[in-house]
Image: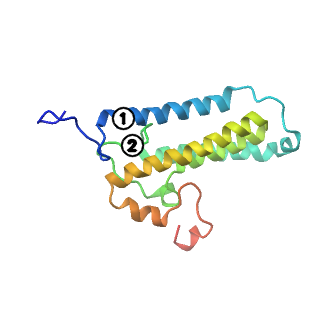
Amino acid sequence: MTADGRAARGGSGRPVKTEKGRAWLWVLAQGVLLAALLFVPPGPEMAPLSRLRPLAYVLEAVGLLFAVAAALNLGNALTPLPSPREGGALKTGGLYRYVRHPLYTGVLVWGTGFVLASPAPWRLFLFAMLCVFFSRKARYEEALLRERFPEYADYTERTPRFFPRLNAASGRG
């Protein structure tokens, strides 16, 4: 509550409690999707894709390493919520120089490897849902970041969301 008795409002004009609740719903949904991908029995394997297992294991390792590096790059700004931490700074260096959501990128690369390591229709379906989920969560997060950090708009113009541009080495990446 504010000093005059009104509900405190977040950057979007919604009460802070509502924004926090919505942010925790994103976290819950992400956890459910990841748990389903990991623990739901996959069903019959898709034999043609099973030849890609060596590549799958490499993608899983690279994805996990990328996600851990992204989390370390965030430092004390890391939060499970899609909303930026109060008093946190906008991170645009390290892996964040190449993509706006390297943690999500790491999970998506890991997920690609996970599905290829044991390809099955249910896993493909759940992974497709995870991809759609991260796309929507990133848009929600970016709306909050634009409200908090005026420079975020310029950052989005020069930095792709999940995967680096092929010309990243040329200085525009």
Instruction: Please report contact status of discs 1 and 2: CB closer than 8 Å, yes or no.
Output: yes
Q: CA distance from mark 1 to mark 2?
A: 8 Å
In which quarter of the view is residue 32 placed? top right
| Residue at x 40%, y 51% (from the top left corner) | 143
Say left or right for 55 vs 3: right
Which of marks 2 and 1 precedes in the sequence? 1
Residue 129 located left or right of residue 30: right
> What's the amino acid at mark 1?
Lys
Residue type highlighted by circle 2 = Ser
Q: Residue at x 43, y 52 (%)?
A: 142
Q: Is residue 72 above or below residue 167?
A: above
Residue shown at 36%/34% (left/top)?
Answer: 20
Tell me the residue that label 1 is attached to.
Answer: 20
Of residues 161 and 54, the one nearer the viewer is 161
Q: Which mark is residue 83?
A: 2
Q: Residue at x 67, y 36 (%)?
A: 126
| Badge 2 density bin: few <14, some 14–19, many ≥20, Cα 10 Å | some
Residue 148, horizontal then vertical, whole percent: 32, 52
Front-most of 124 and 62? 124
